[in-house]
Image (cartoon, grey):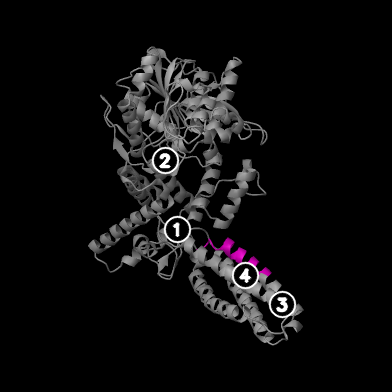
Amino acid sequence: MPGLVVFGRRWEIASDDLLFPGGVEIFIRAIWLLAISVVYNEHRDLLKCADGNVLAAYLIGVIVQLCLIIVINACIVHVSMQGTITNYRPRKQMPSLLYVRFALYMPELAWDIIGTYWTFHDHVGCDRDVVAIVEGAVIFSWIVLVITVVGIAVIFDPLGSRNRFSYWPEEQKGLESDESDQLMTSARSAAARVWENRCKVLCCCAGFDEHSQNAFSDVAQVIADFFKDVDLTPSDIAAGLALLQQDQDRHSVFRDPMSIITTQPQPHGDPHLEDLGLVAHYMKFAMAAYGWPLYVYTNPLSSLCQLSTECSCCSCTSGQVEGGALIMSDNCCRCNLAGILQHTGLMATDVVYATFHNKVYEIPFFVALDHDRRSVVVAVRGTLSLRDALTDLSAESEMIDVEGVEGTFAHKGILQAASFIHKKLEEENILANAFWKVPDYSLVVVGHSLGAGAASLLSILLRPAYPRLFCYAYSPPGGLVSKSTAEYTKNFTCSIVLGKDLVPRLGISTMEDLKSKLITAINSSDKPKYKILVGGVWYTLCGSADPHTPSSTTAPSPNLTQPLLDEITSMPSGRDYTSQPDDSSIRQQAATQSAPLYPPGHIIHIVEVEPASSCLSQPTYGAVWVDTDHFTSIIVNPKMLSDHMPDAVMKALDQLVHVQARGLQPFLQHCSQPVV
């Protein structure tokens, strides 16, 4: 931190990021130098042919170039190891070294062109094996140059020249205030356009209809706004996350198992949330919404045989199947329907409607009759495609109409997905037809991840017509509904969160909070970046930030005061430094930009009581009632992604059900403090 500035523009790499790539290049070129030197010394006599002097000249030229490149790379690696992330002063010679290194690419390229011309033609009287070795050296040299060009393309910042005006105040000296504001606005607009183009390239298969175009614009604006006031490279973020993980682990709150809460206020007293079997039962429907991909993932050995008993390749069109179920947009063999049946144990006649149509803001769902629990179940699929990811990332707030409640906002993309399902249910009378068959059944809406968010908002839309419905939201998005809306959903929604799951903690406000903590952690560290990254890997694998220090005695990082940020007021264009906003300014800016959003309903947080004893065993889980405020901060941990997987949630619920069946108490008391 900050991004390196050379050739008059910013790059997506810092001056302390060149240690590892420089070291790798030194290693490769040293091996290459050794090989070329051995070939030249061992086969010098064989080069005394008609064109041998040309081949010998090429090899000598390569040896000289490799020596120079290794020396300059060694200097770059040495300088890159100096200082800390924010203390750039010991690395102030880096731009000059990079200019020298770039200058060496010119003769290397020219020599490769000449060597190609010399080598790849008939060499009368020369030993063919020696010629082949020289040809291999030429080819290898071209491969190295191509890899270098690819690396430069990866770290190229399309906004590098504009970002100089965004991040470096001294670049604006001599400009009027209106001109400066215009430059800042222009840079931010350009950033939004660049991110929009990146989204279009990465999500090209999502289509380019009106919804997709709007999603591209919304996502680009969110990302551009998030990065507009900081200059962080990817390695800075990785180092900051490593520091945060260690700091959060040192300050974790550990709680002992306590007695079960047997009553939790719910409308009409039904369903009883202390019945974990009910929670686990409906998780099967949330998993079933993913269709055959999740079933194959969770049953890799037996899934193909089991699915083949339900799949039917006789019909490749959407429409009714035996029993009257309407199946839309499934594949030729109706494998998604087969996955639903295998996950839930239902019969084909129990499925009322299923659609696997998937576009931006339009996600798959199915409606089925659950005779075991006497309910009509609407199950919504979670994220399984780039189209779903765009829906997730359309994270701006949008009004949702809730009678009698003020300040009701929701995640824009997920709200539109819920509105799509609601419209489909009404237009095709799906629920009306289901309740015509089973008029005394209740309505249950379920989903996991994106599906949990859509199910929660769909329940709000359906509740005026079905006041006794209930929603189970498994691993719901954190940035989903406003505080008043979250309180309203407690009447009919139960969310289930496993461990350190990232998604229930993820939202614009929590990302702004994470950004400020990252900057604070980076500014407070007195270690070089490479030591932080190596220590972070070691800590993740072995539980200690230092290979020689046990995790229990790891001392906290000193709370340094960032003297450089106060001292530096200007910077020549060749230096790679920019001031960073402190965490208080970021928090204030985040508060003015958007109100925080929360996960819905009452929340059951499943936590580890005892860790797994081995890689093949499973942790021991307990459960605790928590408030929405428990998920206002992102926990950095290797399990932040694995705890979100639906099969992990299902395994934890099954274990809790087993504990409860033995007459034990799987719940902890209601917590007033976050459980980490």
Q: Would you name the residue on which mark 1 appears?
A: 563
Is residue 522 found inside the magenta-colored segment of the image? Answer: no
Residue 354 lies, in percent from the top left, at 42, 29
The foreground one among 452 and 371 is 371
Label 1 element class: helix
What amino acid is at disc 4? Phe
Residue 55 lies, in percent from the top left, at 66, 82
Q: Is residue 629 above or below residue 274?
A: below
Residue 597 lies, in percent from the top left, at 36, 36
Q: How many marks?
A: 4
C-alpha gap between disc 3 and disc 4 = 18 Å
Label 3 element class: helix
Tag 4 near tag 2, CB within 8 Å? no
Residue at x 42%, y 58% (from the top left corner): 565
C-alpha gap between disc 4 and disc 1 = 47 Å
For residue 128, the mark is 3
Q: Nearer the viewer, mark 3 or mark 4?
A: 3
Task: Give the magenta range.
Answer: 15-31
C-alpha gap between disc 3 and disc 1 = 64 Å
Tag 2 near tag 3, CB within 8 Å? no
For residue 388, the mark is 2
Is residue 29 found inside the magenta-colored segment of the image? Answer: yes
